[in-house]
Image (cartoon, rainbow, N blue to C red):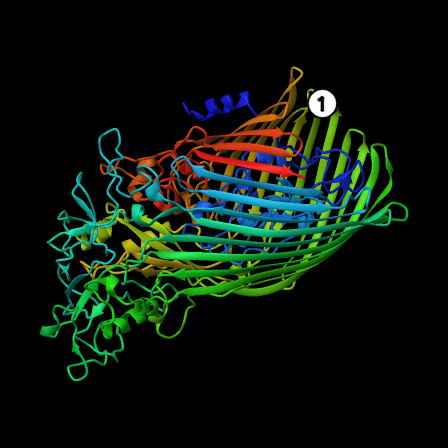
Amino acid sequence: MSAAPIVMGIALVSAPAFAQDAPADEGAATSDDTIVVTGSILRRTDTETPSPVTVLSSETLQERGINTVADAVQRLSANGAGTITQGWNTGFNFASGANAPALRGLTVQATLSISDGLRMAPYPLADDGQRNFVDLNTIPNAVVDRIEVLRDGASSTYGADAIAGVVNIITKKEIQGLHLGGSVGISQRGDAGEQRVDVTWGYGDLADQGFNFYVSGEYQKQDALYARDRGYPFNTQDWTGVCGASGSCLPNLNWNGYTPEDGSFNGLISIPGVTLVRPGSATNPLTGAGRFEFLNPAAGCRGYNMHQNIGTSTTAPLAGVCEVDFQNDYIMLQPDIERKGLTARFTANVGDNAQLYAIANYYQTKSHASFTPLGFNGTPTPPNNGALAYNVMLPVYVCNTGVGTADGLNTGCDATNGVLNPYNPYAAGGQTAQAFLRSTRGRTVDTNSRALRGVLGIDGSFGDDWRYSANFTASEVRLKRSQENYYIPQRIMDAVARGQINFNDLEATPDDVWDFIGPRQQTTSVSQLWQVQATIAKDLFELPGGPLQAAVGVSYRDESIDAPSANPGTLGNQYDRYYSINSVGTAGSRNVKSAFFELSAPIIDQLELGASGRYDDYSTGQSNFSPKLSLKFTPIPQVAIRGTFSKGFRIPSFNESFGLPTTGYVTRTVNCTTFAAFCAAHGNNAYATGNYSLGLTQVGNPDLDPEKSTAFTAGVIFEPIRNVSLTVDFWHIKVKNLITGVTDTSAAEAAYYANNGVVNIPGITVLPGQPDPAFPNALPVIGFIQSSFTNQDQQTVSGIDFGARASLPIGSSLTWRTDFDASYMLKYELKTDAGDVLRYDGTLSPCNITSCSGSPKWRATWQNTLEFGDTAVSLTAYYTKGYDTASIDFGGIKGDCAFNAANGTSTHAYLDGTPVNCKTKDIWNLDLTVSQKIGDKFTVYANVLNLLDTKPPFDPDSAYGLFGFNPAWAGPNILGRYFRIGAKVDF
């Protein structure tokens, strides 16, 4: 039995200010008794809308122990597959440094994130090099009034990209006085420290003085967390201590790791600072032949563990090999993040019937991530015109004027102008040598994003209750990304030809040589957006249930992205490009003209009908009309039935339309039973039988059409007594014309290995990877599968949302408030144009767009608060259901665990072939918050996050096995029990 339901039950005894199903009365009010809700441009008097809306107030966030908008949205039960959490920002993410939700599991680009009802410039880098989105790290946190989450399509109001829903962060309209806040936090293990401070000052009373101005500044620092700071098995890739019921265990995946159970050897893999050499091949000058040996035997493994268990390797040194626990030495689980921002707002009444407002935001976010060092050998990132792998061939002679070559020949150095190469032990015999080594310097990725945003608007009325709104907004995100310790093979060749790299002692190589072979790569990317829009509304006439309201509006928006490639392709020398740095990049601009309307018709007191629509016309040739119909029927005061029907669209992103080749990497294993000839050609060594990285390369297509969606919701609201509300909402979204690259690569992979590398599938190109050092003439494993983005296939997602909330007095001095939200996914289905149906719900899929983080069937939050006097005690429980470990889009079969394990479709197997996890364990944790008011001006609080120190379930299948746990759902668990204390002062 799962422990999660038990903890959910325990959470009932305590409780935070609860999230609502619709907004509280304060907010974007047009009069004292009316509000405007996200997803509408009309005012209303009640808070339960035809569309399901979740509202998180600033008080709710505080009592949940959440201090950023990004964390709040990530915890939503409606947030699903494809979400970008900070756990992805540890060096492996395309969109380094960013954070974004994916409502309904339809990726980050199907969720529209806005602020104060207005669009913001997207993050300049795209998720997976494909999908544009708004980075929630750029939102000022100290002045957030509430977060409204529309769990329904909203293209009829906002236009493109609101297929799955809308996240609207609404800032405070009015602040008076001086407000100070701050907190510090640290994990129970003494790491991942956090510091936060904010200062806000406001002056003016809108009601009495007719104006208000406030300014707010904030700073937040979060320290890094490394794998070595957590316990087994998350601090290593030596998983031989993880064993099944039969006693068989997982292998040792350390570099050159040895697994005693089967005598296997995970090598030969290059080692930081340790040079192995062997003589050049007589038949292939681009590589060596025979066994490697230590260039500097006296230095040995330079502190790494040496062992002689080399299995059947025909290339590993007989003296032994060096084992490196790279997970422990290099891998980061949480990046170092620094945030600071400044916000100002001025609001003034203009006469009796209008209100003018101006908002200015500055926000800066810096992140630092580091991970494993690169080997000196490798292949330039695609597109590389078929460039072969460079194997660091040491020439016979070196000289100051040497020009490097891939084979170490014809460098311009000979006996007349140079000397015998001191690092080539075979130079005296006139023979080149292959050097096999890895840098000692781990790769780093630093991002520095600066977001600017300005808003000027006016709301008012005139004449016979005509209401109008007009606003202008402009925003820009400028991102500087620096990548260090990435190497350019031609520069390595040149330094080798000149004898500048000290292969005997790599750390003795001068810094200027390091800077030459691996110059810092810095790219500045910019996204910009400006928009002007206006609406006018009026009550046309009275119906039995109230006034018939109508509104119309127009909008013009201009948006652009300039994100140059950090490693652009070239028709020239492919070795002048970096190893490992992706070539992804894009540049483009477009404008969109829009017109929209909305009608609200309370036919009778019990029946409310609504209709809205929007037409968008893009300068890039796409256009779309998005209608929406809504209904709310209240047969008795305690029960309301609601529903919506809508159509929406997602415009192709700049990367999808104009993107340069983009490569994402997945982990694969060859099935040596099915492809026995391939494995036999490699002597069934670790190269053929172990994991390898496969690059999936996609390129932009300017002729793409928009994705089109059809959605409907149907729900019931039950309010049996005052302050108690129960909701159930069914939702269904179907998206056609999906913009995708390769949906399923299994056919291409099978054809490659079965047909000696020949693949004849239209639209797909398969390129070989690096050759096997032991069998350089055998067919290599696959290196890359290339395709272009195209409109194909359709997907359907559906599910049920449950909500329960109550605020009840217990005696005269105690109040209990509870808020439960859960989302159950009924279906996540992809139907290909060929007629294949892939069911992703409840599995690790879709791997290709979620990095194998999965589509869990259940996600839930239960928040409870007890208030007594000036004290509040809160417990919040979070739950994510486990999933089948099959990666359906990579050929896996849900429920066929043995097949998935045998074929390497994400499911790992013990050495005896039995699967490790057919289904993962559930993920849950519990947070505690206690706050105490001291007088009218001072509040102190304490958070104990992950109160029970619940560990993440061991999951070697998710995230391509990078972490041993799922970073999308188990980030709070890997952090462990976390303590935070803070205070607020109001003057």
Residue 47 occupies which quadrant of the picture? Answer: top right
Residues 926 and 570: in front is 926
Judged left or right of residue 311, residue 784 is right
Residue furthest right as drawn: 464
623 vs 38: above or below = below
Kindly tell me whether residue 468 is visible in this rendering. Answer: no
Residue 948 spot, x, y in % from top left: 43, 28
**Type of amino acid at the residue the image marks with label 1:** Gln
Looking at the figure, which quarter contains the N terminus? top left
Instruction: State the count of labels.
Output: 1
Q: Residue at x 47, y 57 (%)?
A: 447
Q: Residue at x 18, y 59 (%)?
A: 775
Residue named by callout 1:
638
Residues 706 and 752: in front is 706
Q: Residue at x 35, y 48 (%)?
A: 331
Residue 553 spot, x, y in % from top left: 76, 52
